[in-house]
Amino acid sequence: MKKIKPFPSAIVLAVAVTALSVQAQQQPSVEVYGLVGVSYTSKNNQGATNASLKELSTNSMSVSYLGFRGREDMGGGLNAVFRLESSLAPDNGAIGKPVAYFDRQAFVGVTSSQWGAITLGRQFHALTDRTIRSLDVYNLAPANAHVVPVSLYGVNRYASNDNRVNNSIKYRMDNPSGIQAGASYGIGEAAGSTTKGSSYSYDAAYVGPNYQVGMGKISFNGVNTVGTAGILPKHEVTAFGGSMTFGALTPYLAVYNSSLDSATTAGLKTQSNKAKAIGLAWKASSEVLIRTSYTKDDGTDLNNVAGRNGQKNTTVVSAEYALSKRTSINGIVARNALSAGYLLEPLYAAALGKNPAAASVQFYGVGINHSF
């Protein structure tokens, strides 16, 4: 039987298509993404005169941000990844923070479909990842109302209350279901010391068909030793909790325990905080999401002062209505109530912008978000 030889042009076309296919698979993808939102807000008991403060600010439900992320398929289930992310202030056009342009995240790493991911740079510690994913109904997102108290449990009190970690290495294994886990380490970069300014964290969770339960720990070392004995102060947080979905309802429950040594003086009491948080998300319809949370924080020896004890109660209620796939409007109401020793706590007074003598701050906000 006579063999039919393919036309040279057909051979060239086949080779070209194959080459383009291989090149397309190896071509890295870069995506620009983000969220822009603005809210009109009102807070009472502000400043020395207990005045009401009305502002146009970044949206109350989520900080505005601009990001760039990329992925390159290296074959064999391996991908090179990077992320650069900066906060935005749409009310005045500011971007980033004075200390860092990409203040939210800046990391590069490698992911494996079989072995997980390793990332290096500025990013969340492992416990903060777990709190966002499993423990907090608001995913630690609302910028103005819910910043206190839960998000302050994931910050480095020895580094200007930073809620990310610089110079860090993180490993994550996040299966779609079943066991998830992560571990992270922040290098202190102090001359002559591997412990000053360093930090570590870990988390673990089990994700079921309609529930997830998780736990973790984060530990920060001070940047300097204190006292003649050269004691290195520590700030440590442990957390445990989870959520379960029943139809349109998803309740959350979490417990946080924190201990904080004085950064400057030896021999002072260690501040202790025990917080219990409950939350509920109700997907009322395809367009409407209603959420609420309540957190009770019992503080002992606040500011490392013996006997300075107090309680802080935070209540948040919000509603979001989706106008489209990417655009939504929202409203939020929040109240932070403080008693006894918490009235003298300067960090929370500054975070809330309140008069130190005021026992509570009420917050109201309405706004619009657009994601891209």
Image (spheres, rainbow, N blue to C red):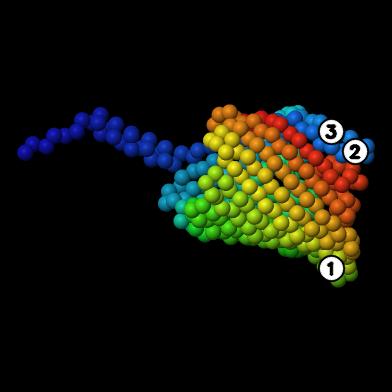
Q: Which residue is mark 2?
A: 50
Helix, strand or loop for disc 1: loop
Residue at (75% x, 41% y) in the render: 334
Helix, strand or loop for disc 3: strand
Is residue 189 or residue 289 the one in the foreground? Answer: 289
Is residue 131 or residue 265 the one in the foreground? Answer: 131
Residue at (85% x, 57% y) in the render: 310
Quarter of the image with the N terminus is top left
Q: Are marks 2 and 1 in contact (CB under 8 Å)?
A: no
Report how many numbered discs are placed on residues in the image: 3
Judge the density around disc 1: few (<14), some (14-19), many (≥20) Cα neighbours within 10 Å.
few
Single out the residue that lies furthest toward the right: 49
Mark 1 to mark 3 CA distance (whole Å): 45 Å
Whether residue 32 is visible here, answered yes or no, is no
Residue at (78% x, 50% y) in the render: 313
Quarter of the image with the C terminus is top right
Q: Which mark is residue 53?
A: 3
Q: Amino acid at mark 1?
A: Gly
Mark 2 to mark 3 CA distance (whole Å): 9 Å
Q: Amino acid at mark 2?
A: Asn
Q: Which residue is mark 1?
A: 230
Residue at (75% x, 60% y) in the render: 274
Q: Amino acid at mark 3?
A: Leu
Whether residue 208 is visible here, answered yes or no, is yes
Judge the density around disc 2: few (<14), some (14-19), many (≥20) Cα neighbours within 10 Å.
some
